[in-house]
Image (cartoon, helix red, strand yellow):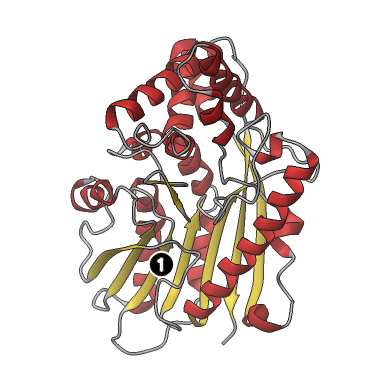
């Protein structure tokens, strides 16, 4: 994933902000943990005392990795005992907030090393659209909500910052890039997995007619950016460059590469699930009727996940200036909260999960 103005696309807001506000992603991933458990039951783990290797592709700041890694270690222990080493590699881009990741691994009360011997966490600062681990080294792969980010933006996005709310032509270009990136991701993982290894990939879902559930949130944020141009907070040139490399894939897009000859012939799709992920922030609102709290949660979710990518479009000097970056983020957050205060409707989204095996 390339860099513009010194900031990396697809990196979450730092200083632990993503850890604090990425509840939607955590809730969606939690629905897929039974599939991860199934993957571990089916996993081919060779005998011996060599380390079992888990790869966490797209770890961000680590908080959302704790529950799946803790469960994976618990299930693996049933198979390999408590003395066998387990290595966990957390993989994200070089500009990821690895300080927050290491703080989580060291001090979070839910960290997976508590009361577990022979657990060795490590981090790799590299895009998962490259080779990140040696061939045939990974027993179990996990990737949650990360592969929705593309390796590059294939086109400008007129009228919006996200392709699936733009023109049919733009959507087609992003569909093509999403297909290429998905195949590249799978080819790389096929290389890294051991024979008999398993990979679980969790992604935001969209229905066959293209509905994902968060469209209103993105449209409100788009209106906020237009307001900021009118008010002189950002220039129209900066606004025109703002684009998220985020593109959800339909079920048929995710399943298309399997069964092909060539590089992907080593991989078999063992299971696919798609579920509606309830809006737990809305459930809390129904209990307390606190509209401001609901709007705040949604605005902070948007800010923590997408703001750094939008800030890449700020003119050189502003994009790398901490005060300018913070002011841009504060403006987006406050204006989005005001717009969302009247949006008292649930925003249920979808989650898709694939269980993939490398042939023995």
**Residue 56, percent across and down?**
41, 61
State the residue lying farthest toward the bottom.
48
Q: Nearer the viewer, residue 300 or 283?
A: 300
Left or right: 202, with 275 as reference point: left
Q: Is residue 245 above or below residue 115?
A: above
Q: Look at 24% across and 59% down and name the residue there.
A: 113
Q: Nearer the viewer, residue 344 or 313?
A: 313
> Residue 78 sits in which quadrant?
bottom left
Q: Quadrant of the C terminus?
A: bottom right
Q: Quadrant of residue 94?
A: bottom left
Q: Residue 288 location, x and y as percent? A: 46, 13
Does residue 343 appear left or right of residue 284 in this picture? right
The local crowd at label 1, few if under 14, some if 14 to 19, many if 20 or more residues have their Cα within 10 Å, is many
Mark 1 lies on a secondary structure that is strand
Q: Position of residue 103 (x, y in %)?
A: 21, 48
In the rendered image of this protein, does residue 34 appear above or below residue 226?
A: below
Q: At 23% from the left edge and 45% from the top edge, which residue is drawn?
A: 109
Q: Count the marks: how many?
A: 1
Determine which quarter of the picture holds residue 118. bottom left
* Viewer-closest of 112 and 241: 241
* Residue 124 makes an appearance in the image: yes
Residue 187 location, x and y as percent?
A: 58, 74
User: What residue appears at the point 70 percent right and 34 percent down from the top-left corner?
Assistant: 165
| Residue topped by disc 1 | 55
Locate residue 168 relative to residue 69 in the image: left or right.
right
Q: Is residue 10 above or below residue 36?
A: above
Residue located 23% across and 49% down the image: 99
Residue 22 shows up from this direction: no
State left or right for residue 163 relative to residue 124. right
């Amino acid at each position: 994933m390339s860099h513009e103005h010194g900031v990396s696309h697809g990196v979450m807001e730092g200083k632990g902000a993503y850890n604090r506000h990425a509840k939607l992603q955590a809730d969606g991933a939690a629905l897929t943990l039974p599939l991860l458990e199934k993957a571990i039951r089916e996993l081919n783990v060779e005998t011996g005392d060599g380390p079992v290797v888990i790869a966490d592709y797209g770890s961000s700041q680590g908080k959302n990795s704790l529950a799946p890694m803790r469960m994976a270690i618990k299930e693996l222990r049933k198979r390999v005992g408590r003395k066998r080493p387990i290595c966990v590699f957390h993989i994200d881009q070089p500009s990821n907030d690895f300080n927050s990741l290491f703080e989580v691994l060291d001090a979070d009360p839910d960290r997976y090393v508590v009361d577990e011997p022979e657990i060795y966490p490590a981090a790799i600062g590299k895009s998962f659209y490259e080779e990140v681990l040696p061939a045939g080294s990974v027993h179990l792969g996990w990737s949650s909500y990360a592969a929705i980010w593309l390796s590059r933006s294939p086109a400008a996005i007129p009228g919006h910052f996200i392709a699936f709310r733009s023109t049919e032509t733009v959507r087609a270009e992003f569909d093509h890039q999403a297909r290429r990136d998905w195949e590249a991701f799978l080819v790389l993982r096929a290389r890294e997995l051991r024979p008999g290894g398993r990979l679980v990939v969790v992604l935001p879902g969209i229905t066959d007619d293209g509905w994902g559930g968060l469209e209103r949130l993105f449209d409100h944020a788009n209106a906020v950016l237009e307001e900021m141009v009118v008010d002189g907070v950002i220039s129209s040139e900066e606004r025109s460059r703002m684009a998220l490399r985020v593109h959800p894939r339909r079920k048929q897009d995710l399943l298309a590469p399997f069964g092909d000859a060539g590089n992907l012939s080593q991989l078999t799709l063992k299971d696919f699930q798609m579920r509606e992920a309830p809006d737990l922030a809305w459930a809390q609102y129904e209990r307390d009727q606190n509209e401001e709290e609901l709007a705040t949660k949604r605005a902070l979710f948007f800010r923590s996940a997408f703001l750094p990518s939008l800030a890449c479009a700020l003119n050189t000097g502003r994009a790398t200036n901490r005060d300018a970056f913070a002011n841009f983020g504060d403006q987006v957050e406050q204006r989005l909260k005001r717009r969302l205060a009247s949006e008292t409707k649930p925003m249920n989204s979808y989650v898709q999960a694939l269980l993939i095996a490398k042939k023995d």
